[in-house]
Amino acid sequence: MAEFLYRVGRLAFRRRWYVALVWAAVLAAVGLGALKAPGAADEGFSMPGIESQKAFDLMEERFPGATADGATARVVFVAPKGEKVTAADHRKAVESAVADLADGSQVASAVDPFQARAVSKDGTTAYATVTYKVASNDLSDASKAQLVKALDQARDTGLTVDAGGTAVDSAPGAGGSAEVIGIAIAAVVLLVTFGSLAAAGLPLLTAIAGVGVSMATILALSHPLGLSTTTGTLAMMLGLAVGIDYALFVVSRYREERAKGREPGEATALAVGTAGSAVVFAGLTVVIALAGLTVVGIPMLTKMGLAAAGAVVVGVLIALTLVPAFLGFWPNAVLRRKDRKKGRVEQEAKDNGGTRWARFVLRRPLPVLILGVVGLGALAVPMTSLQLGMPGDEAKSTSTTQRRAYDALAEGFGPGFNGPLTVVVDAKGDADAKGDATAKGDADAKAAVSTISRKIGATEGVVSVSPARFNEAGDTAVFSVVPSTAPTSEKTKDLVTTIRDARPALESGTGATFEVTGSTALNIDIAEKVQSALVPYLIVVVGLAIVLLLVVFRSLLVPLKAALGFLLSVLASLGAVVVVFQEGHGASLLGVETTGPIMSLMPIFLVGIVFGLAMDYEVFLVSRMREAYVHGETPAQAVTSGFRHSARVVVAAALIMIAVFAGFMGESDSMIKMIGFGLASAVLLDAFVVRMAIVPAVLALLGDKAWWLPAWLDRILPRVDVEGEALTRTADTPDPAATPADQEAVRV
């Protein structure tokens, strides 16, 4: 592996113009394809195999067109204090607003609350439902402006008017202020790390080029592969982060080789052969973690994972080819200013912050290990009370109209009104089995639906049940069930379980089957499926990564230690998320106004993304230790050498990752805040506690045993020479093919 990448790096350095032109041509080609490709579809969210999804599928089959993904808006009217919305002047204002809402080319219907009995018992609150012909992503600016105008005109009459629903929501996308903040902080970190504008700018430039290729490819393939508008979000975030990190490691190793007196071409080849080997295997661990998302069984998550894995592959290829090509263009620009002024590159002092920290840990390995494990364990304890769900409008800021509409509906109609359950009754099997005439079959179906509706309505915790709505064939009915508790309440979850548990008795008595769905039931089903998929996902991802690390480090204990350390950091970061977003401690500091269940996909996101990134740091840091150990240093000396060469770069890489993820904490959406906080805290804990403290402590305690591998396993595993042992001989051999330009470039 090292020798092959050595040749790749040397070739890219010599043929730098060809490499740069090839990447420019690739970017132009995929960019042109993206411009000509049809727009990405809004595929919606689906999760095969859960009851809620089965109910949605049945509704689409039996009620054609009725469950289309048209956008909706629920406009809430609240009368001034002490007045009623049913008063003549307020009623006139509401009816006028509904008429304005219905007047639009994309509006399918706007229901008058007085005709639909959508008025609270105390007469203070009413709501109108507006249904659109198109999905929320396809709403025109004119339709959105018309909705806002109607709300403003109704407010001018003295009513309090707010709106929720998909027509009001603005889906967060990639490419916002979070990325800008992340890039800005990354630039500062790189500048401090390298002390050179060119050295800081090169990783940023190549990472942006890689993200450009990845995003353009995703857009070009969005229509034929059925990718949604959200598929590229994760690809952009990870592509940017790993692209900077991988280039950072190659450039850092290049400067190190130049300090040893290597000429630019040789230094570039050695950097790609050694640091590039670590980049390849680090990239493979990230790809494994992302591709492993297919195990979860959520189509949207699978596509996001594969798209992000593709972006990581592009980042690896960029680091192995375009970065050495740019080093060929500017071999001295990436050096420190003082080195360029002196005309020679000075070797870094043997003692730096990394070596001093390593010696501190080596002197006190057991206390450091205990303190790190106990600290992470204490942070992980709150994770035992983790409640999964899908936060809705109740988690938004009170400054948003969606949150105000949610609160107004809860106050006027009860907390359960915002999360009604939908029951879909299938009586077709009953009528077909009896073989009765159509009229009698319809009567049996209506009787079965009536019985099921009455029994569910009598369940404790149910406030009301709506009249059943039948399809044209009369064999399927749908009705809504309003709980007495809020959608995120544990009591609502228990109610769903109670209704489903009563199903066998109801089905045997009526001959009809039914499914329970709706947003609340869907969240419950998603949480259960994610929890059941988490263990298989961990087994697949961690298992494959351990095998990969066995090949890289040729050690049995180092991969196991890496995996256990990752589990500690992920559990601790989940515990931190629970403390802030579920229990509310420190939530106000992040602008989180309402706490509640943790987003159902959060554990999967943390495991998938952070595992790959954690293995990045493990490979980059420990591979330098392995390299030193293979070249004859003692275990303690190898740890110190690894920290001397890699600690500063690993710290810089981690800070860049944290900056990219922490940028999302500034977004207004609570779920985006949660993702940003969770990922940033996980990287912080894994990089600085696990990799920088626990890892050297464990290696110090194990000594030579850390690098032990059974003889039979040593014979089975392929040898990839990540340490670049073969390059030691190559580097000492003069290169007869070096051009005069290459030789001249060594003179700073």
Image (tube, rainbow, N blue to C red):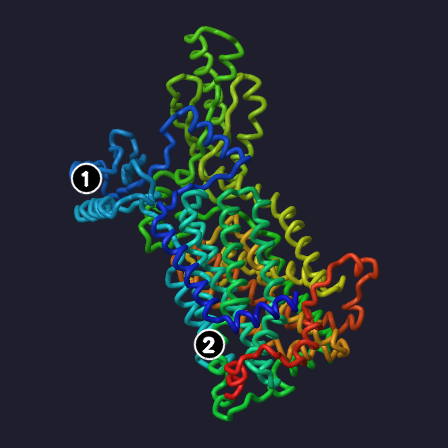
| Residue plotted at (69% across, 79% down) | 640
Residue at the right extreme, as displayed: 711
Q: Residues within 10 Å of mark 1 (few under 14, many from 20)?
A: some
Residue at the bottom extreme of this rendering? 342
Where does the image place residue 643, in percent across and percent down from the top left? 65, 77
Q: Which residue is mark 2?
A: 329
Of mark 1 and mark 2, the one earlier in the sequence is: 1
Q: Nearer the viewer, residue 482 or 147?
A: 147
Q: Which of the pair 228/66 is nearer the observer?
A: 228
Where disc 2 sits, the SS reads helix
How crowded pointer 2 is (Cα within 10 Å; few <14, some 14-19, many 20+) is rated as some
Rendered position, 20 above or below 30: below
Q: From the viewer's perspective, is residue 461 above or below residue 212?
A: above
**Relative side of 619 to 246, left or right:** right
Residue 313 in the image: state x and y as whole percent: 54, 58
**Mark whose residue sits in front, 1 or 2:** 2
Residue at the spot of label 1: 100
User: Marks 1/2: CA distance?
Assistant: 63 Å
Residue 570 position, x and y percent, is: 60, 59
- Is 303 placed left or right of 6 in the picture? left
Looking at the picture, which amino acid does disc 1 mark?
Asp
Instruction: Tell me which residue sits at (62%, 88%) in the image.
Output: 349
* Residue type at numbered disc 2: Phe
In this rendered view, identify the residue nearer to me: 294 or 65. Answer: 294
